[in-house]
Amino acid sequence: GGIITQTPKFLIGQEGQKLTLKCQQNFNHDTMYWYRQDSGKGLRLIYYSITENDLQKGDLSEGYDASREKKSSFSLTVTSAQKNEMAVFLCASSSLIANTEVFFGKGTRLTVV
Amino acid sequence: GQGVEQPAKLMSVEGTFARVNCTYSTSGFNGLSWYQQREGQAPVFLSYVVLDGLKDSGHFSTFLSRSNGYSYLLLTELQIKDSASYLCAVRDRNSGTYQRFGTGTKLQVVP
């Protein structure tokens, strides 16, 4: 089996700060995703990348940038952290061919003070 | 519009069953997945359905009615450890590769 590793697990930032979240997967999956999870709001897609060198905006891309550095890694940047923002950011991956199952990392919990 | 709706909470008694409902609206349905998410943990895939009817996977079964935009996840012989959030996710032809998630249903199994 494979694993998705997200770093850091906890991230505390200041208002207006630029923050970067990292994700690595060893499934050899083509497609990677970044979701944001807020209490009571489910998972909302921020960015995804179908294959290496591809980048697609999701429903919640404003205020974020993403970069698919190589097939195994996908990073997300919060361009300007909002005060009192608190959410969990989940990285995920799936096979391009058999993408019915999506595998998730354990998440990065962001707090902005 | 397109959306995925789930009730926020559900409570059931140990040893009985729980049915977690999901309704969706989409312009071109292309599959529905169910995930389990324990507190503080990553979502874990349970089941995928694309055809109408009941799909029995032992402890978990899933039902789909495409004409009604409706699915449910049925958990039988409930155990306390089944307490978790259950997420429904729909893929449609507009979203293509990615799945659109509902808000999740938090199931509490009580003795």
Image (spheres, coloured by chain):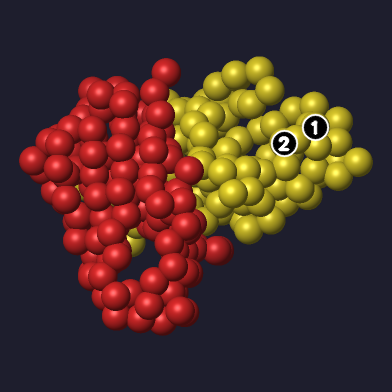
Chain colours: A red, B yellow
**Which residue does the numbered mark 1 point to in the structure image?**
B79
Above or below residue A86? Residue A34 is above
In the figure, residue A99 lies in which quadrant?
Answer: top left
Q: Position of residue B27 (x, y in %)?
A: 28, 49
Dot 1 falls on a residue whose secondary structure is: loop
Whether residue A38 is visible, yes or no, is yes
Dot 2 falls on a residue whose secondary structure is: helix
**Which residue does the numbered mark 2 point to in the structure image?**
B82
Q: Position of residue A102 (x, y in %)?
A: 38, 34
Same chain assignment for discs 1 and 2: yes
Whether residue B86 is visible, yes or no, is no
| Cα–Cα span, label 1 and label 2 | 5 Å
Above or below residue A37? Residue A24 is above
| Residue positioned 30% across, 48% down in the render | A22
Q: Point out the image quarter for the N terminus of chain A.
A: top left
Query: Is mark 1 in CB contact (under 8 Å) with mark 2?
Result: yes
| Residue positioned 80% across, 32% down in the render | B79
For residue A65, the mark is none
The subunit carrying tag 1 is B
Q: Residue furthest right?
A: B111
Closer-to-camera residue (B18/A51): A51
Residue type at tag 1: Gln
